[in-house]
């Protein structure tokens, strides 16, 4: 019985190691490419605030969340991003091809979500970043991209990425 348990634990550990390796390879393959001078390009949020990524990421790492209202996986990630923002974490979101500003504002209100949003209605901003998958999360610290991941990410995964960007 003990040898069977050890075998299952060993095989489970091997499986988790292979899964983690595969996920890291997929993230590297799908990693967005930050456009030149991205950190100084002014962006406008739905609230009318004009921001730059360099300014937002100067003191605290910034989590940039590329998402869409039509994205199925984003249904699970968006509440965690909103939770991070509500807890005072530095968050900026970019809504990819999710309609005009009024449509997007109504959608956010209907879902009870409140975080800073840049509307990328035609997808131009996402194309410049080479975003091919939603959701995609990018961590920027002091104007430099330090981490990227795409697909579903847990709340704790986001917290750890922000923490790692702060300590490194």
Image: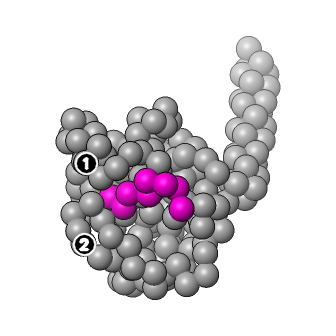
Q: Which residues are magenta?
A: 117-124
Residue picked out by circle 1 = 102
Q: Earlier in the sequence, mark 1 or mark 2?
A: 2
Give the image quarter of residue 32.
Answer: bottom right
- Classify mark 1: helix, strand or loop: helix
Residue picked out by circle 2 = 49
Residue nearest the observer in this picture, 165 or 96: 96
- Residue 98's spot in the image, x, y percent? 41, 45
Quadrant location of the N terminus in the rendered image? top right
- Residue 7's spot in the image, x, y percent? 79, 26
Residue nearest the observer in this picture, 29 or 88: 29
Q: CA distance from mark 1 to mark 2?
A: 16 Å
Single out the mark in the foreground, 1 or 2.
1
- Residue 136's spot in the image, x, y percent? 54, 53
The residue depicted at 36 percent of the width and 61 percent of the height is 118
- Residue 156's spot in the image, x, y percent? 44, 50
Is residue 82 something one can see in this rendering? no
Is residue 68 something one can see in this rendering? yes
The residue depicted at 45 percent of the width and 40 percent of the height is 74
């Amino acid at each position: 019985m003990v040898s069977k348990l050890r075998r299952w634990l060993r095989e489970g550990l091997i499986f988790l190691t292979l899964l983690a390796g595969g996920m890291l390879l997929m993230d590297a393959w799908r990693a967005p490419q930050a456009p030149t001078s991205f950190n100084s390009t002014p962006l406008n949020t739905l609230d009318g605030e004009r921001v730059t990524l360099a300014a937002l990421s100067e003191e605290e790492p910034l989590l940039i969340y590329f998402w869409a209202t039509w994205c199925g996986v984003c249904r699970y990630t968006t509440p965690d991003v909103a939770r991070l923002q509500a807890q005072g974490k530095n968050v900026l979101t970019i809504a990819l091809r999710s309609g005009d500003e009024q449509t997007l504002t109504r959608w956010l209100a209907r879902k009870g979500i409140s975080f800073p949003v840049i509307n990328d209605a035609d997808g131009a901003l996402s194309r410049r970043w080479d975003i091919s998958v939603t959701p995609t999360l990018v961590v920027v610290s002091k104007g430099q991209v330090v981490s990227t991941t795409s697909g579903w990410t847990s709340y704790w995964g986001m917290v750890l990425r922000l923490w790692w960007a702060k300590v490194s």
